Every structure is written in C-alpha cells, then in structure tokens.
Amino acid sequence: MEEIGKLTEEYIQVLAKVKERRKQWHDHAKPFLKQHLTAVSEKYKLNWKAGANESMQGLEVVYLVFDHEPSGIVEQSPFSIVQKMKVGGFLSFSQTRNGQVVVWISFPFIDGMEEKPKVETLETIEPEEVTPENVSRFISKFLDEMIQWENDSRDEIGFGRQHGLYR
C-alpha cells in the first residue's frame, strides 16, 4: 500500500504540472509567440507570415509559414498545362497534451509531385522556455533548413525518378 500512496502523490504532482504548463502557455508563451513571430515576419521581408491555429483548445499552434508559390515546374499534356505549386515550409510551436511545447519544421514540397512533406522535430520545451533567445535560435534553424532544402537536389523528384531511372 505504501507504493500506491507514493504513486498517487506522484500522479497528483504530474497533473498539477500539466495544469501549470497550460497556464504558462496561455498566459505567456502563446501571446509572446504571436507577437514575436509577427514582428519577425514584418521586419524581415520574405514571402512569409505568422499565424495561429486555435481550433483545438489545449492543443493550439503558433507558426511562421512561407506562402505557396509557383514552383517553376509546369506539367504539359495535349489537353492541359498545369503550374505545380510549391507549398511553403513552416516552423511550428505546438502545445502538446501535457502542456509542453514541441518545436518542429514542415519542409516545403511540390504539390502533386511528392506524397507529403518531410517533418523534423527540433525540440520539446517547457512553456517558460519560450524566450526571445530560444525562439530566435529556432527561427535561425528553420531558415537554415529552408536554405538547404532550396539548394539540395539530392532527392529530386524529376524525370529520372518518375521513370525509374534512379534506384
């Protein structure tokens, strides 16, 4: 019975920590992220914007996203010409079920030519770790990954792959 008592107390503490994380997210982290990412997107003129998805209370997301744009790839057939769009990558700060914040990147992709975008988790942090320094570090990592994606042609989706020339 002593073990059950210890585990019960530990569980009560975990539940209190989750509640405190959610309060920190709501009171500090989410408003700070909205303001900070908006300021960055306005100061540094790229084809990007800050936003939030608050449709699931307790699982909100604040993000910095590149807009969709023409990829420069055009599919031609005897009946149509289709401009393939590049779906922009984004940096996401997502609240988890236990109130922590997962920071992750979704990479750009060419719509209709790739199954789904590559996703990379950068870090899971506590809401109080959402600081100007950490957010700037994550934005820098995000931009570095976008630069690498644009420059790297090793995983090309072009003619050779579509016709089985690359194995």
Image: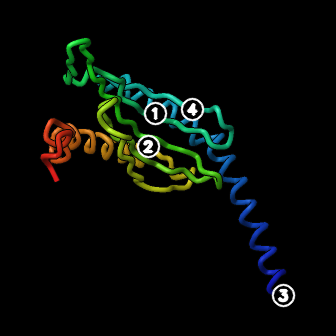
How dense is the environment of label 2, judged by Cα within 10 Å: few (below 14), some, or many (20 and up)? few
At 47% from the left edge and 46% from the top edge, which residue is drawn? Answer: 131
Category of crowding for the residue at label 4, using alpha-carbon neighbours closer than 10 angstroms: few (below 14), some (14–19), many (at least 20): few
Please identify the quadrant where the C terminus is shown. bottom left
**Label located before the other in sequence (2 or 4):** 4
Residue type at tag 2: Pro
Q: Disc 1 residue type?
A: His
Instruction: Select label 2 or label 4 by which is in front.
Output: 4
Question: Mark 2 and mark 1 in contact (Cβ < 8 Å)?
Answer: yes
Q: Position of residue 18 (x, y in %)?
A: 69, 56
Q: Which residue is mark 3?
A: 2
Amino acid type at circle 4 is Asn
Q: Quadrant for the N terminus, please.
A: bottom right
Q: Is residue 35 left or right of residue 138?
A: right
Q: Position of residue 56 (x, y in %)?
A: 66, 37
User: Decide: marks 3, 2 in contact (CB < 8 A)?
Assistant: no
What's under tag 3, amino acid-wise? Answer: Glu
Decide: marks 3, 1 in contact (CB < 8 A)? no
User: Which residue is tagged 1?
Assistant: 36
Residue tagged by mark 2?
132
Q: Residue furthest bottom?
A: 2
Residue linked to disc 4: 53
**Nearer-the-camera pick, 38 or 122:** 122
Q: CA distance from mark 4 to mark 3?
A: 44 Å
Helix, strand or loop at mark 1? helix
**Secondary structure type for disc 3:** helix
Q: Give residue 105's quadrant in the image.
A: top left
